Every structure is written in structure tokens, then in C-alpha cells.
Image (cartoon, rainbow, N blue to C red):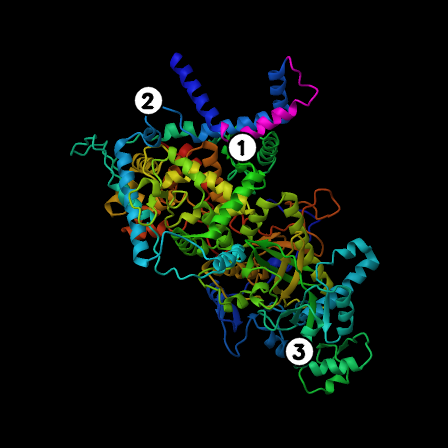
Amino acid sequence: PFSLQNQNYKCHGSSKGKEREQRASIRFKTTLMNTLTDVLRNRPGWVEVKDEGEWDFYWCDVSWLRENFDHTYMDDHVRINHFRNHYELTRKNYMVKNLKRFRRQLEREAGKLEAAKCDFFPKTFEMPCEYHLFVEEFRKHPGITWIMKPVARSQGKGIFLFRRLKDIMDWRKGTAGKKFASLEAQPARAPTATVNPSGTHDTRSSDDQKDELPVENYVAQRYIENPYLIGGRKFDLRVYVLVMSYLPLRAWLYRDGFARFSNTRFTLTSIDDQYVHLTNVAVQKTSPDYHPKKGCKWMLQRFRQYLASKHSPQAVEALFSEIDNIFIKSLQSVQKVIISDKHCFELYGYDILIDQDLKPWLLEVNASPSLTASSQEDYELKTCLLEDTLHVVDMEARLTGKEKRVGGFDLMWNDGPVSREEGAPDLPGMGNFVTNTHLGMQGRWEVGVPGGAGGIQHSTV
Amino acid sequence: MLQEESDLSLIIAQIVQKLKGSSLYAQLERQAWASLQRPEIRLESLKEDIKEFFKISGWEKKLQNAVYSELNVYPLPSHPAAPPEHLKEPLVYMRKAQGSWEKRILKSLNSMCTELSIPLARKRPVGQQKELLNKWNEMGTDEPDLSLFRPVYAPKDFLEVLINLRNPNYENGDSLSFRTHLGLIQVPLKVKDIPELKECFVELGLNTGQLGIDDSTQVPPELFENEHVRIGQKVLAEQDSAAAQQYIRQGSPTALRAELWALILNISSQPEDILYYEQLKTNVIQHDLLVDSLIYKDVKLTASNDDYYFVFEDYLYQVLLCFSRDTSVLGHFAYNSASPPKSYIRGKLGLEEYAVFYPPNGVIPFHGFSMYVAPLCFLYHEPYKLYQTFREMYVRFFFRLHSISSHPSGIVSLCLLFETLLQTYLPQLFYHLREIGAQPLRISFKWMVRAFSGYLATDQLLLLWDRILGYNSLEILAVLAAAVFAFRAVNLMEVTSLAAAEAVLADLSTLKVMPLLQIFLFATVT
């Protein structure tokens, strides 16, 4: 790459660059036992510490974070892989709330057209507190299908579809039932958001806290009935976004990812068959049709090529551009809420669904995307993903801070849009502005990958 | 001069004969009649006016495409006195070999049939028919018990037959000389060498733009890609088959490929075609054939296990089951050295009046057959379009990959071409592999039989098949196979066993075919 003397280009991350301490070895800690451990252990100069040892880098799980982050002191150079209150983005009910608020703000500031760009999330209502609003919406569109999802569970657990209010009566009689009963007795009112001293975002009023029953929050969401099908099957996309900071917002988009297929053919006649509708690999693995030898994933490159053979280049370009928009808007919506700590970075797994009109929808954002590999190809993808993540985090202080691409990551947002062209000013107003994203396009094995010591050799032919 | 003229008139007569039976003829006739209403058609100059009308309305182009298609597919008559077998295969020993191979296959099929006590064909009871109709779009969910079925043959069985092929008229002499062919194929067929291949594949040269090379992200699209796409759109607008075939030699843009292939193969989706497909579907519903189980088994074993094609499992059934009932496929046996197997109605063995072709299309699938269809699912998703394209590809190209013939695109010639290229231009490698018991053909045979489907990444495979269509020849498969060996030569020189050699060549999914071909043909010092 040629000289990056562009004044318009803002640096990112540690512009201190070479001033940062070059450490002799980097002590890492993790509790995961999968691809991540392989990557960390193979990284030159990285040493594992266990138990109570001091660490420079910790890939932790969210429960540890919740219990310990607030009373852990970290030196300047130390890095950890989650933001303290990431759930503002990753818990479905909070994300909806933040997005709705951001949308209102956008409408006030920039008009309806700009606000409409936030309409990538199917209509969602928090349960039980928005139950009445939900019923109102439900009655406006009789006969459509809705999906009920628990806010905090993953891997497709606890999800079901319904079309009639009757269908959720039984569910209501369960653990959440009493909750509903108490709510219905009271006049409907807007949920009050109270922030408890412990920092948890909690919408329960003080009355309800008296309840002994642990209430699991759900969301009821409009089910997308016309998904794009390939080979008669429904699929969703898993895309990886790495956020290095929120204030200012700096986010990287990984070029690779995959499309996850449902094992069975899509039909609306059997909404009870969760195997049809849920595309998580975890759910598919328990389906009677599942054969482990059969991957049910396509790499994104394949998916993009498939689309290119069916739709015009403009349509494909437009789709991917709308997908970029999902990332940016969702991150912007929580930008002011998430505690931006310089020690924190986070690798998100975005789940995107495409409908038959080639419109992308955001299903959810995962703060801990699965790093376990389901096949050799998957293993390679995740290994490269993690290696490149560590390159961007740059504990070794090798990056100059001016890179637009590191391995398979493209700098997508740097306190503003980033242009694809080398050395071009990042001014979106200019006619030829093309964003610096390459989702599903050629992978990381191209000429001139900066900052890469170690890493996998790939032949170019 | 006279000979040429009479040849030409013979050809014309033959083509006219063929086209007279086609729907295009009926359409042209209708159009001609309808055009009489038009003001520009005058009685005095009827012929010229109608011709002019055809030219303007695009019907002439359609006729042109049809003629071009016939010229491509049907071999030119060699001699008016030549018997029809000569059209299938001029060399007697090849015909004999094909005949005995067919006998073996049929024997194998019949014995499987007797062993399992399953009839070759039976009518489905009404209940089952209804069930199948309901499940038509998701036949992949069925898990019938296929454990007792075996594929009728696998490519390696076929290879053994080819290895034992000998021309009884050819005396090699026992002494080894530099002319001795060290490969597995020991028949004296003429194959091209690199200078001839360079002439033949001139558009793949270093100075010509290619998709698969000059459209990579480092190359600015203004240099080649944009213009190439523009020309492609123009070709499609003109609906000219011959132009499309010439154009596609440099590769097809992804967005235009489906239409270009349809144009080159002269496939138009008329209502009759859709109806014909539905008819075939009805045949499938009503009758159950033994080959259906073979097809199921093949799909389950190959395409369903493939990382990319598993998604299209259902389409494969819909195409292959209908294919086996399509009697129009029997037409290609006129120029195929193979002949459709005959079966007899129960109890009437040997009586010609009770003979039927089995399966109805005369093609018995082998292990890996479904891979011919799988890549096409990337281009077409209406079943009838997918079906038509596959059928056309089969009767033009794929049949040559599993029948014994002397045709330059036949599998025997391809094997010989591959081995000769290797022996002539990579003698050290060839000799080394031979010494360690790893005859190269044993590894590359399966690639060529499948036209590389399932071995290359899909986008690369489609670029390769673009060139098959463009050059109307399968020779490029042999060239690519040799180019792959050349590319991995360094690693191959280090191996000491067949298994190790197989391992080096096990994964072709990262290869880019066009640079490989270009380097092998145009950039290697010969």
C-alpha cells in the first residue's frame, strides 16, 4: 500500500503506535476450550496464565464480566473482550428500546427518510410489559405469524411461533403467567426504566419486585413470512463485527461469515416444527434430519456468488449496502449508552435474515458468538477470524493506526464512514464514495496484508 | 469442388429434415401464414417479403440459432454409403468394447434386480402416487432404505475397461522406444499437442482478456471487465447463438451466464417445453423404476454430502427422475457409441415386439452422475429450465465422458491427451509417478469423468464449463488435469506412494482454473 499521508484520514486505536510498550510476552487468560485456545496458544510471544495469575489479555465469558469487571483494576495496556454493558445491544428487549429511541431522535434531527433507515428490525414488543401494545398491533394484522423469543437465551432455546392469542394463553399459564395476571389487573402504562444501583437495566416497578417467581422476559416479534429461500430452504447470515470503541465509534467488518440453512424445507403450514424455522446450528443439530457430515452452512462468498447469478449486480450491491447500514445504525443506537472503556473491545455475531424482496432484517446481535467449529472449513474460518481480531486489538503494538484493512477485517466506521479507495478522503458527500466493506468478497488471502506476523499461508492460485 | 457441393447439399438436406420435425418449423409456418395479413407483404414478391419479415421480426435469427445448434451437435455425414453405426462410432474394436461393457452393466443391473426381487419397473398404487405428488418439492426428506442398493458401476470400474482396450490391428512391437506410450491407455488415437492446443484455444492466450483472471479485484474493471460485460449484454440482445458461443470463450459474467448458456444450447422455454416437463413428472408419479433407487442413492452419497450442493438436493431428484423417463434422449444414441439397454416385458424374453428401452431414456446412472446436474442449480431454479439445460448438456457433452469411442472429446481421447501431455511436457514427473505405482491417470480420471464437478469451487467450475460450451469440446478437461499436475509438480516429486500422491491432489477447491490453463498452454517453455 502506498503512503498514507492523507490528512483527512483519521487514525484509529492507539495512535501512540510505537510509543506503546513493546512487551516481552503477553499473558492471556481464557476459560473457553475451542478454536480460541488454539489460536491464543499458537500466537508467538503469548503465554497462558491460569487461575489467579495476572493477565494482559482476557477472553472472558459474560458471567465473569458481570461479577468482576466493576472491581477489577486494569493497567492501560490490558485488554478484555467485552464491554461492561454490552447487553444494551445484545439483549433483544434492550436493543429494541435503544433502536426505537435512536429512530425517534433521527426523525427529529434528520427527517422521516433518514429515520426509515432504522426499519430493519421486525416489529417487536417486550413481554410482559408491552403486552397491551402488542395486542393492539396483533389485532391490526389478524392472521400473521408472530414469534416469541426469550430475551436472554441463545441457541434457539425457548422459541415458538404463534398465530392466535389463544396459543400464548398456555404459555402464559406457565412461569410468566402470574406476571401477566398481575399486569393485566393494573391499567396499562408505559414501562419505567429504572437503573438500579447494581447497574442493571430493569423495568420492573417496585411492586413487582416483591414477586418470588423469577420472571423471564420475552419479546414477541413479527415473524418474517417471506424469507429468501435457496433450494427451498430458509437460511440466515452470520456476520462478524469487531468494535474497538464506542466513543468515538470504531468498527471493523469481517469479510467472511456464513449462511446457516435450516435442514427442512420452508413452509408456513407447520409452524410447530421449530426445525423448519430456526436456523441456528445448535437447533439443527438436534433435528432428526441432521447428519453431521452434511454441513448446513455456506461460506458467505458462495452465497454472494449465488446471488450474483440470480440478481443484477446493482441489486446485490444494494443488498450488501443495506446490510452495512444495519451494522452502523445498530451500533450508533447504543453508542451513548454503552460504557466505552478503552480496555474493552467486542466481537459481535450479527444474525441477518433476507426476505424475498432482498431486504435484510436484523434478527439479533450476539456478544459471544460461538467459536466452536462444526467442520474443517468452519475451523479455518474461526481461526482466521480470531487471529485477525487479535491483530486488530494489537497487543504487540505493530499497527500504525492508519490501516483500513487488517487481515480479513475492513475498517467500516471510524467516527464516520470510511472510503474504500486508497488515500481517498472519507467524505461521503463526494460522488464516488464507496464504503470500505467487502462482505462475502474475496477473502483475506490477497496481496499486501499489513501487520501480519504469523498467520496462515495461502496460495493465490 | 463437386464433392464439396454435394456434401453441402447433403448436410443441408439432413438439417432441413431434422428441423422439419421441430416446433420451430411449426412456429415459422404459423408466422408465415399470419404475416400475409401484413401490408408490406405483396403477392408479386411473396417469397422475398416474407423473408424480409422474418429477418426483421427476429425469426430468422431463431432459425439461424437452430441450424447452428444442429451443426454443433450432429456430426457431419462422412460418406453417403456409411452405415448408421459409423455415425455412432467408426472404429469396430471400439464398438465391440462398448458393446461388451454395456452387457456387463445390464447384467449387473439385472442381477441386483433378481437379488432384491424388485422389478425393473412397476406401476405405483394410487395412494403412493398421491403421497409422492405431495412430497414432490421435498423428496430429499425421504429416507428410503437404500442399504441394499449399490451403484451399478463407479468410474474406477470404467477405467479398468479402458485400460484393457486394444486395437487388434495395431502392432506396437515389444521394444521400448521414445515413442512408447508409458501411460495406462494403449490405443493409438490422434491427440493434440501443445502447439495445436494453442491454436485451438487461441482466445485463452496471454494477450486476451479473460474472466477468471482479468476480473480479479486488483485489476481495474475499466481494463477489461466493463467492456466484456457490455458486449455480453449486446450478444444477448441480438439473441445470436454463434456470437454467444464465440463470446463465452473469454468467460461469462455471473449475471449473464444463465441466459448465455440457454442461448448457446438453443433452449427456449416455450409452453410446450414446460408441458413436456410436467408430462415427465406425471410419468415419475405413476411408475416406479428401479433406477429411481439408484438415483436416490447417488444423490445421497454424492451431492447431499457436498458442502455446497447439499442445498439443492430436492432439485436433483426432480431433474434426474424426470430425465430417466425422457424418451427424447434416445435421439442422441444416433451419434453416441453407446446403445440404450433393452429389456423385455415379463415372460417375453427375446421377442422384439415386447422389447422396451430401459430406463426409458436409455441412460443408466453411475456413481457420481448427479454431480452433472448440481452446478446447474446455481444458475436456474425453475425445474423445467434446469431440466432442459441439463438434458441439453448431457446429449451434447456429458454422454461422451462415459462411453467408449474414438471421438476427440470422448473419454478415451481425453485420457490419452492427458497422459501424452504429461509424458511429453513433464517427463520427469510422469516417470517418477509411474515408478512409485501412481499412474497419473488413476488420480485424474475421476476429475475428467465428472467434468471436475465437485472437485473445483463452483465459480471456477462454471468458468471451466463456459469454455466447454465456447469451444464445443471437452478437451479442455484433459488440459486442465495436466495443468493441475504441473502446478503441484514440486510436491508430487517428493511423494513415494500412490496414497501420498492422492493426498497432494485431494483438494482442488482453492485452484483458479484460468491462470492454470493459461500458464500451462501459453507460458510454459516447451
Check if mark 3's residue and mark 2's residue have beta carbons within 8 Å.
no
Chain of the residue under label 3: A
Relative placement, left or right, of A122 versus B264 is right
Read off the chain for label 1. Answer: B
Which residue has dot 2 on it?
B81
* Image position, residue B508 (x, y; %): 42, 48
- Tell me the element at label 1: helix
Q: Is residue A142 above or below residue A415?
A: below
Q: Whole-Å distance between the Cαs marked 3 and 1?
A: 62 Å
**N-terminal-most mark, 2 or 1:** 1
Is residue B393 placed above or below A306 in the rendered structure? above
- To which residue does mark 1 refer? B23
Name which residue type carries label 3: Asp
Residue that appears at 25% across and 38% down: B165
The residue that mark 3 highlights is A170
Marks 3/2 same chain: no
Can residue B458 be seen here?
no
Residue B193 location (% of width, % of height) = 34, 30
| Secondary-structure class at tag 2 | loop
Tag 2, which chain?
Answer: B
Q: Foreground residue, B327 or A190?
A: B327
Task: Please provide the residue range marked out in magenta.
Answer: B20-44
Quarter of the C terminus of chain B within the rendering: top left
